[in-house]
């Protein structure tokens, strides 16, 4: 069984590791701390029953326009894919963006050649136009 919750600073190293395993673009650990300190409710993690981080979202408000949010990163370990985990993580992050910051516009930038499946997953979720 998997559970999803808001991340805390103790989860950042596991999120960083999940990112390094799954994605071609990796962030410095201090970037995760920056997100956790600046927007503590906009990053979610998914854990399995043993507490292993198997997916996460890293969200923030746009720095130029705080009425827009940005999903910086989404990652799910290979063994946990095809379970709608990315869908649930993104949906929860979007809900918090809307509920806490009263922002209903969230963007996700993707590399089409690498992440074509992610576009198909997130497009209906985020009501992209």
Image: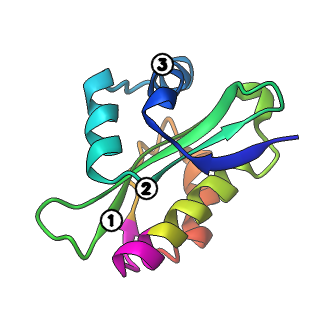
Local packing at callout 1 (Cα closer than 10 Å; few below 14, some 14-19, many 20+) is: many
Image location (x, y in percent) of residue 123: 55, 66
Vertical position of residue 80 compared to residue 91: above or below: above
Question: Quadrant location of residue 81?
Answer: top right
**Which residue is painted at 38% across and 27% down in the image?**
25
Q: Which residue is mark 1?
A: 69
Q: Nearer the viewer, mark 3 or mark 2?
A: 2
Which sits in the foreground, 114 or 21? 21
Which sits in the foreground, 76 or 121? 76
Residue 104 falls within the magenta-colored stretch: yes
Vertical position of residue 37 compared to residue 120: above or below: above
Residue 67 falls within the magenta-colored stretch: no
Q: How far apart in space, not on screen, are marks 3 and 2 (Cα)?
A: 20 Å
Q: Nearer the viewer, mark 2 or mark 1?
A: 2
List the single residue furthest toward the left. 64
Q: How far apart in space, not on screen, are marks 3 and 1 (Cα)?
A: 23 Å
Reading the chain from its start, which is encountered first: label 2 or label 1? Answer: 2
Q: Which residue is mark 3?
A: 20
Image location (x, y in percent) of residue 18: 56, 24
Image marks 3 and 1: residues in contact by CB distance under 8 Å: no
Viewport quadrant of the C terminus: bottom left
Q: How far apart in space, not on screen, are marks 2 and 1 (Cα)?
A: 9 Å
Magenta extent: 97-106
Please tell me whether mark 1 sits on a helix, a strand or a loop: strand
Q: Which mark is residue 42?
A: 2
2 with respect to 66 (left or right): right
Reading the chain from its start, which is encountered first: label 3 or label 2? Answer: 3
Image marks 2 and 1: residues in contact by CB distance under 8 Å: yes
**Which residue is painted at 67% across and 57% down in the image?**
87
């Amino acid at each position: 069984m998997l559970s999803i919750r808001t991340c805390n600073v103790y989860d950042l190293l596991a999120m960083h590791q999940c990112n390094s395993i799954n994605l071609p673009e990796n962030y410095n650990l201090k970037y995760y701390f920056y997100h956790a300190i600046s927007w503590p409710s906009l990053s979610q993690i998914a854990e399995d029953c043993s507490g292993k981080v198997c997916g996460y979202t890293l969200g923030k408000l746009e720095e130029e326009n705080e009425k827009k949010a940005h999903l910086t990163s989404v990652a799910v370990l290979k063994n946990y894919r095809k379970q709608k985990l990315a869908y649930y993580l993104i949906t929860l992050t979007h809900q918090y963006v809307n509920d806490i910051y009263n922002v209903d516009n969230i963007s996700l930038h993707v590399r089409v050649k690498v992440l074509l499946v992610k576009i198909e997953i997130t497009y209906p979720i985020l009501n992209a136009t």
